[in-house]
Amino acid sequence: MAESAPARDTPPADLLSGAIHSAGYVISQRDFALPLDLALAQSALHELDRALRAPEQAAEMLRTATWTPMARPLLDIIRRQILHAAERAGDGEGYAESHALLMAVERVQDALHDDDLYAVVDRLSGAGALELLVEVAHDMRSPLGSILFLVDRVRSGSSGPVSEPASRQLGLVYSAAFGLSGLASDLMELSRGGGRLVGPDASEFSLAEVFRRVRELVQPVAEEKGLGLIIDTPPRDVRRGHPAALVRVLLNLATNACKFTAHGEVAVRAVMLSNEQVRFEVQDTGRGVPAEVAQRLYQTFRPRTGSGASSGAVAFSSAGLGLALCRKLTAAMGGTLEMHSTDNQGTLFAFTLALPHG
């Protein structure tokens, strides 16, 4: 589709008016998603006409405009229309006028770059959006790590005696901070393809220690919601595998189970199928996963379809990053994440891994 408007019997008052008119025609042919978008774009074109006629005032105009995020693509269309018009004019006067207008476009572009809100919107909607999100996630992890360290020291009694109620509250703070830190880590890991941090070399670890870590982090969340937490700790033996990834998966599944369970219990188990094969299960007595949700369960940034956790419940992210990463990490460890759910009875997540004895 050509990006210049068809010829008109009545010529525009000037080159800029013609470029704005042609830009309006172009955007009207692009099937904007909502009528409101098209109306806003047409209004923005009118304001850009004003800005381009007085580019020295553009910064103030853009700072208060609701359509500022649309300005760059519209300016790109206007620039092309100016070039089309100059090419059609083909004389010295038309060239001089188009050159002056192109310089005005550049001044308005410079004003846009100086606008902080526009800069953020531009990065979030451009090719560097993922890089920006990863940078933000990386910056989040450092202060969250400090929170985890300080809370852990206070809970351990390093700063003096801690009452039982205060200890439970600190445990909840620790779990919440750990959940946020995990969300940041999930985003960073998924940006690299997910599962790549599970290296080819397995290490020796204790299943009992993995389950102790999961209990330590999930217990405060379960207690805050009045849920029973059943951790079937396996025997203290030495296995070879990827303990950090295993903890991430079990922790994500267990905190999700707490989030969507209003009454009853959450259980985390390890079932020895053979000398090497271990089946891990996380089961809850929650409301179950509706069929329409199950179809996009592992979709990142899935749309909300409900209120999430029950009123007053402790809840972490609904972005879907955790389950998406669980499936990738499970696959990287050589297993397959399964989900079985029954309405109003609960959900079971399970996977089987080969973990030879060390």
Image (spheres, rainbow, N blue to C red):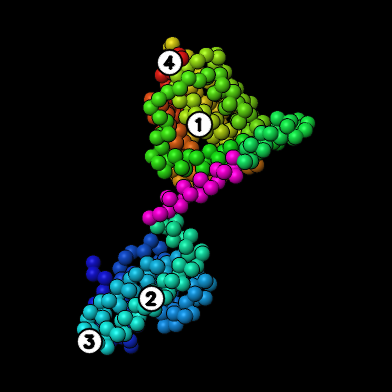
Q: Would residue 313 appear left or right of 124 to someone viewing this image?
A: right
Quote the CA–CA distance across marks 3 and 2: 21 Å
Q: CA distance from mark 4 to mark 1?
A: 20 Å
Between circles 4 and 1, the one closer to the viewer is 4
Left-right relation of 158 to 343? right
Q: Amino acid at mark 2?
A: Val
> Which residues make up the magenta segment?
127-145
Find residue 9 and report its image quarter: bottom left
Per the image, label 1 sits on a secondary structure element best described as helix
Q: Is residue 16 magenta?
A: no
Q: Residue furthest top?
A: 275
Check the image and report above or below for 187 versus 245: below
Mark 1 is on which residue type? Arg
Mark 3 touches mark 2? (CB < 8 Å): no
Q: Earlier in the sequence, mark 3 or mark 2?
A: 3
Residue 322 circle label? none
Q: Which residue is mark 3?
A: 91
